[in-house]
Image (tube, helix red, strand yellow):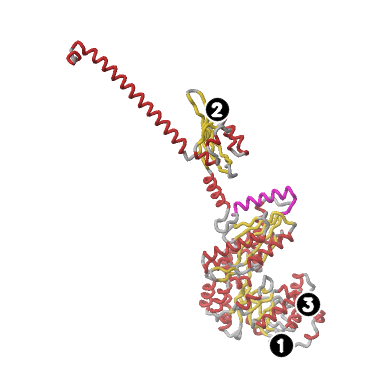
Amino acid sequence: MTDMLWHPAMLPLSFGLLGSMLFVWRTYIRLHEGKRQLERQREEHRSLFQNNVDGVVAVDSEGAILMANPAACDLVGLGEDELVGRPFPDLIVEEGRSRANAALEAALGGIHSTLETEVQHLESELSEVELTSVPIVIGDDVVGAYEILRDSTERKRLERELEDRALHDYLTGLPNRALFSDRLAHALNRRRRDAESVALLYVDLDRFKPINDRAGHKVGDHLLCEVATRLKSLVRDADTVARIGGDEFAVLLETVDGEAQALAAAERIVAVVRAPIITGGEEHQVGASVGIAVSTEDLESPEELVHQADLAMYEAKRRGGFQFKLYSHELEQEGSGWADQIEGQLRRAVEKEELELVYQPIVDVGGSRIVGVEALVRWTHPEHGLLMPNAFIAVAEKSSLIAEIDRWVLEQSCNDIKRLLDFGVMDTPFCLSVNLSARHFDESDFVDAIEDIVRRTRFPSNLLQLEITESSAGGDPEKVRELKQLGVKVAIDDFGTGYSSLSYLKDLDVDVLKVDRSFVLALGADPASVAIVRTILTLAEMLNLEVIVEGIEDPVQLAHLEDLGGSLVQGFFFGRPVPATDLPNLLSNGIDVTKGRVHHDEKEEVGAVRGLPPLGASALSIIPKSHRKWKPGRRRP
């Protein structure tokens, strides 16, 4: 049999049968392999569907759910068996359902689309999703759609966080300048619609820079955060507190009845910011200069209200800080145009030595003698003539010029008085008093600059008296102590006009209190002013401090002051300020305190400035009887 199979005549038949068998075998192998590949593709598809990190829902041509993967089930909090058969758009929150319906209809029409919406979780939680609708195409027919739900909750959170950071201050969490400007614009638009007033309060911290420089940025950051917290505690929920710069804040009062309500808010801000702040076991005190602007019917833009509040704030700071100022048209006229005009000229004036000094005597009326002088700066302007400090010092304080002017005044006056001392024109003890600005005092090298000038001019430090504001002294007592270590005397200027704190006087190593002229003007007419001056004199005596009363312009004021026990005075009654060249003559002639040194025409000028009639002989009749027998050299008890 075997021989027959291999017989040459049987070979064609054998190969035909074998070929058929091989063909069948190969076909079987191919079909089996195709089935395996198809099964593998199905598994891969199932794996892709089931394990996709995005939620995937398959819907039929009617929009009913056919199947859903675990990620989709997790998003809505339902199992697949609970989802099958439901209309897919029902999973979307009501606000986005119409858009989801439109996207599904587009997918069933063969068009891809993507939108952002939210799905409702079974436990009332919302998930933000990016919904992509993809048509399912078999052949040429669209038989359904895949709805792919990509959870964007975390991405949206990060986007909102980035947006929040862009609109809020990183340190305090308060709105920044950009967000504040937007809220201000909305508030003013609403004001025009509802006929309500809006108030803007600009807050600039006093004494912050020296504390930040000395104690470090960590302490400075803590102070800023504490101030932010205090400001937020003062306003209503509808109002806005923002940090708009390093140590600058803004408060938007959405609705106010008028200026009175805005002024009351500013007063609370000044008081609450001034309260001591304890950090790192150390107590610090900052203050606030607050500018107030209230919207009016003719206000044209938010920028205009910001400008008004900013201008008022600078005026409050110019006055020594720790106070507030309401914007007025007069302030605008005094500030902007004139400031723009003279700032550059003032800078050149310093370089060209157009500034000059005059000296006003400090008089001991009890001893009838001049015991010192205060150096006062004047500007001989090439066009406007002689300018008083109130015409240009405010401009200088808004720039770096004020420190340069202060140093020039101090050095020039030390040289002038040292020359007179060397020639024996005056007897010691004799005091040179120089007023220094709060902004200059805030500079970190302030004490070093003073020491350098005293050393170079060789002026006796014990004869030098530096006048600073009470806010400066109270805000940086350590700097006051450093000045005292140089041997100089420290005077608190315009005492009683700010938020005077009696507690800090006992801790401050100061020598002199200078009573502001505003109290002197009312002596004999305003009981409150009399009480304030009497209190200051009594307090100074208890604390072993000297008191210099400014603004004595007539014998009536002098008499009332003497009746209260005051002795050291300044004022036009004893003569106008004179240049250094006239000091020898002034000192040699002395002072007659019963007559003063003011000529009759000068008295008229002084009275006219204050809206008062000129002094005549009859004015002496209203001097208290207790003073009519008072003679020079006799000091009243």
Circle 3: residue type: Gly
- Label 3 CA crowd tier, 10 Å (few <14, some 14–19, many 20+): some
| Rendered residue at 66%/65% (across/down) | 270
* In the displayed structure image, the side of residue 1 where residue 495 appears, left or right: right
Circle 1: residue type: Arg
Mark found first going from the N terminus, 1 or 3: 3
Circle 2: residue type: Ser
Q: Which numbered circle lies on residue 635?
A: 1
Label 2 SS = loop
Residue 237 x %, y %: 67, 55
Task: State the CA–CA distance, disc 2 to disc 1.
Answer: 111 Å
Between 560 and 361, the residue placed more toward the observer is: 560
Between 464 and 216, the residue placed more toward the observer is: 216
* In the displayed structure image, the side of residue 308 where residue 618 appears, left or right: right
| Rendered residue at 62%/39% (across/down) | 95
| Rendered residue at 58%/45% (across/down) | 125
Q: Overall secondary structure of the magenta stretch? A: helix
Q: Which numbered circle lies on residue 524?
A: 3
